[in-house]
């Protein structure tokens, strides 16, 4: 049976485990630009394995396109695993630091109240500003950022989405697909 | 043992049994060439006229011998001149290790003289690139680079050494370990561990499933792709074809993977595929493609490609599955291993009616009897005169298609052609590499006047190294393939394709110290070939061909595979 693909465009989250070597991030990123797609967000950082980096990429596209880019990624020698994470079986979080104008006491109180509702933290205070750190899924951070907009955001630093699977599943679990890709990259 | 860093680089080549490298020196790679001076008894260096020629030569050497090709170039323009050659090797999965040297660490990233970020440039056209900043890592990186180039799906790798790394006062700890034993050294081992150490084996369940599908098929068709050639799986492929009693269509890259004269072969498939191949593809109920990536020149219209068939892909590279054509089943593994497993399980079948239907569509080529020399006459003359195992390298365009349609290639590495990248100028470089790697074979370089002009300066290399390459120029005074499209699709607007200009190719050959002859009919062609085969030096035959000759059949790009524009 031939595989069928969902043609609707939506956000997909890809989690990658790659060797921590120079150029690996641009090697991965160029596969998206090659097909003319813009990466919505990309987060790169340590993984639990020494020498390996975990990259999380969010991309808008249809299933066939996302699968093809994932296939091209998996083919790269330094790439160990690429997994397309399902929304209902994974947890996705992002983190933002927002510097808002708060020159008077009332505004400051209001910002702090809002922050409390969202379980955000005040991480810096000055006479004219408050800096708030918020952590949560995309809908929560977006809602909070929108509310802060009313006070006047001076600047904001935000990560892209980080994601991890629910339950026992882990990225580097052995499976047939991984084994199949390793054939083309075999060095023995 | 302490050795010079440059010495370690060359010793690492010896570890890989490399005895020949192609290249061109320059400022930043001086240290390595100085070391090469001391190694000239062990490593033969072929100096080409241009880095692109060196890249194609290393590629042609790799394709024709099955070994890894090696190519040196300097930084900046030397390195960028390689890029077309690197991309050509990448698209056709040819294992070549490119070694360049860059400026010194303190000059890096400062737009220094002849500096370019070649590892960045080469990233999309290599399996891996390495920038070597620490001399101690040389043996590790060299060994890994060769392992990556040669194993799995083969392909080019680039190593860029900073000049200070190769400084002649730079010494490192080094011990010679032959490649057959060094696959277990640190970095390769680490890489293997991260890729699941055990040498992979095709999934037996997948193999069994295909065996079952074969049992149910009434009208099976096999496609012989480049993977059969790269994997040297021609014997296993032939055995399977005979067991299945199925027609075999061959892609451009698959030339040599299945005997061209075998009764089951239907010839080339795709844009310039034969009637038999393309119809078979359209009517079969099971299509087994081995080492074939269904490029747009094969699967012209992916949605309707083999629409009556269950499509099965056998490939070493998982990312090729469902890339261009959606498949019903796939087996991942080297062609050689998968086919061997199939041959152990598939019984003998017989499909007389299906075979009759398809093989009756095979047509004998018309040679043309007029006074004017036809491409077919040229190729027949070569076929008759040259020994049967002669290597044929081609450039790109009409002469390429004619050559592949006409010749029967019987073993992997007999046909050298730029199928994926379509690089004009590939042919002469590749012929040089092939002749260097196969000194006892006859090497024919088929080219067009446009392609030949792109790289004809390599005749200097042909002359200097006494390579008896026979260049056959299909000289029709035009960029024939482009003209053909202009004629058929662009209302005969021959925009910038007419090449009514020099040089005189015979005089050009003579200027390079070679022999040459212009031929206008079959008798002259036959004489010229005899002369070329016996003269012992490079020979250029300038064949005067009509400007309006076309490649037949032809299916336009994107059209259904049996919608022939030309029969």
Image: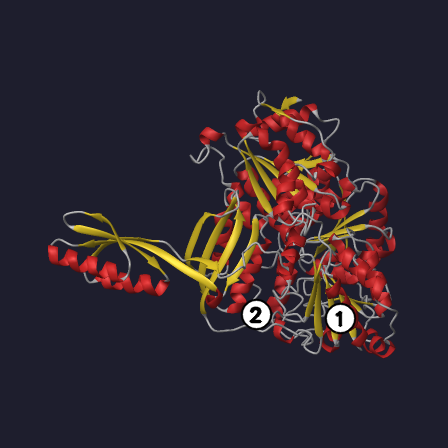
Asked if residue B420 shows in the view, the reply is: no
Do circles 2 and 1 both sit on a common chain? yes
Q: Chain of mark 2?
A: B
Q: Quadrant of the C terminus of chain A?
A: top right
Relative to residue B555, is residue B532 drawn left or right?
Answer: right
Tell me, yes or no, if residue B557 can be seen here: yes
**Gap between marks 2 and 1, in whole Å?**
28 Å
Question: Is B543 drawn above or below residue B274 in the view shown?
Answer: above
Q: Nearer the viewer, residue A2 or B79?
A: A2
Q: Residue B30 vs residue B512: left or right? A: left
Colour pattern of the rendering: secondary structure
Task: Determine whether label 2 and label 1 are within 8 Å by CB.
Answer: no
Question: Farthest residue toward the top?
Answer: B169
Q: Secondary structure at mark 2?
A: loop
Secondary structure at numbered mark 1: helix
In percent of width and height, residue B172 lies at: 61, 24
At x 19%, y 58%, the residue is: A111
Q: Residues within 10 Å of mark 2 (few under 14, many from 20)?
A: few
Q: Which residue in the protein does label 2 denote?
A: B490
Q: Position of residue B95 (x, y in %)?
A: 68, 46
The residue where tag 1 is placed is B277
Direction front: furthest residue: A168
Picture quarter with the N terminus of chain A: bottom right
């Amino acid at each position: 049976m031939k595989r069928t693909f969902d043609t609707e465009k939506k956000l997909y989250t890809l989690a990658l485990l790659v060797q921590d070597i120079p150029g690996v991030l641009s090697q991965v990123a160029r596969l998206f630009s090659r097909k003319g797609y813009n990466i919505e967000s990309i987060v790169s950082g340590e993984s639990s394995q020494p020498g390996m980096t975990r990259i999380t990429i969010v991309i808008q596209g249809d299933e066939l396109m996302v699968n093809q880019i994932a296939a091209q990624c998996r083919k790269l020698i330094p790439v160990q695993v690429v997994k397309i994470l399902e929304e209902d079986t994974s947890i996705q979080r992002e983190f933002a630091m927002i510097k808002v104008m708060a020159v008077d006491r009332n505004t400051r109180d209001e910002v702090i109240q809002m922050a409390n509702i969202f379980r955000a933290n005040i991480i810096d205070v000055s006479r004219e500003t408050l800096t708030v750190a918020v952590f949560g899924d995309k809908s929560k951070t977006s809602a909070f950022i929108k509310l802060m907009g009313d006070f006047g955001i001076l600047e904001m630093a935000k990560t892209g989405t980080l994601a991890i699977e629910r339950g026992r599943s882990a990225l580097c679990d052995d499976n047939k697909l991984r084994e199949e890709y390793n054939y083309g990259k075999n060095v023995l | 043992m302490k050795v010079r860093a440059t010495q370690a680089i060359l010793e690492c080549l010896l570890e890989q049994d490399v005895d020949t490298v192609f290249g061109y020196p320059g400022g930043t790679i001086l240290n390595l060439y100085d070391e090469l001076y001391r190694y000239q008894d062990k490593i033969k260096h072929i100096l080409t006229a241009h880095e692109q020629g060196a890249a194609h030569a290393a590629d042609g050497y790799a394709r024709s011998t099955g070994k890894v090709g090696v190519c040196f170039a300097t930084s900046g323009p030397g390195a960028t001149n390689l890029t077309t050659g690197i991309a050509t090797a990448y698209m056709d999965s040819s294992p070549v290790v490119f070694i360049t040297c860059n400026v010194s660490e303190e000059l890096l990233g400062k737009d220094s003289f002849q500096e370019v970020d070649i590892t960045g440039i080469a990233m999309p056209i290599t399996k891996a690139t390495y920038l070597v900043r620490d001399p101690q890592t040389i043996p590790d990186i060299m060994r890994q680079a060769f392992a990556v180039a040669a194993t799995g799906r083969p392909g080019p790798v680039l190593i860029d050494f900073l000049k200070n790394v190769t400084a002649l006062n730079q010494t490192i700890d080094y011990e010679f370990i032959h490649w057959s034993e060094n696959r277990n050294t640190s970095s390769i081992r680490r890489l293997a561990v991260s890729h699941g150490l055990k040498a992979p084996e095709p999934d037996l369940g997948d193999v069994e499933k295909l065996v079952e599908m074969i049992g149910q098929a009434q009208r099976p068709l096999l496609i012989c792709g480049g993977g059969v050639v790269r994997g040297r799986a021609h014997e296993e492929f032939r055995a399977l074809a005979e067991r299945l009693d199925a027609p075999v269509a061959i892609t451009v890259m698959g030339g040599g993977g299945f005997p061209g004269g075998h009764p089951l072969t239907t010839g080339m498939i795709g844009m310039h595929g034969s009637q038999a191949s393309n119809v078979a593809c359209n009517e079969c109920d099971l299509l087994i493609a081995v080492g074939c990536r269904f490029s747009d020149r094969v699967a012209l219209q992916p949605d309707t490609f083999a629409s009556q068939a269950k499509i099965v892909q056998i490939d070493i590279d998982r990312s090729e599955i469902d890339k261009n054509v959606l498949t019903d089943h796939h087996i991942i593994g080297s062609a050689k291993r998968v086919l061997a497993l199939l041959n152990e399980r598939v019984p003998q079948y017989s499909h007389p009616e299906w075979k009759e239907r398809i093989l009756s569509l095979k047509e004998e080529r018309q040679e043309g009897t007029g006074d004017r020399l036809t491409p077919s006459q040229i190729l027949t003359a070569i076929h008759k005169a040259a020994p049967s195992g002669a290597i044929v390298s081609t450039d790109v365009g009409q002469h390429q298609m004619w050559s592949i349609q006409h010749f029967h290639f019987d073993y992997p590495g007999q046909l050298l052609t730029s199928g994926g990248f379509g690089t004009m100028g590939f042919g002469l470089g590749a012929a040089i590499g092939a002749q260097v790697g196969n000194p006892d074979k006859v090497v024919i370089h088929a080219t067009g006047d446009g392609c030949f002009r792109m790289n004809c300066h390599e005749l200097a290399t042909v002359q200097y190294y006494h390579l008896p390459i026979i260049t056959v120029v299909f000289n029709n005074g035009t960029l024939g393939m482009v003209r053909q499209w202009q004629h058929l699709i662009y209302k005969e607007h021959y925009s910038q394709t007419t090449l009514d200009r020099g040089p005189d190719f015979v005089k050009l050959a003579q200027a390079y110290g070679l022999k040459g002859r212009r031929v206008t009919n079959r008798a002259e062609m036959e004489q010229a070939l005899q002369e070329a085969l016996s003269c012992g030096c490079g020979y250029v035959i300038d064949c005067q061909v009509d400007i309006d000759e076309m490649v037949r059949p032809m299916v336009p790009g994107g059209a259904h595979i049996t919608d022939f524009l030309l029969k």
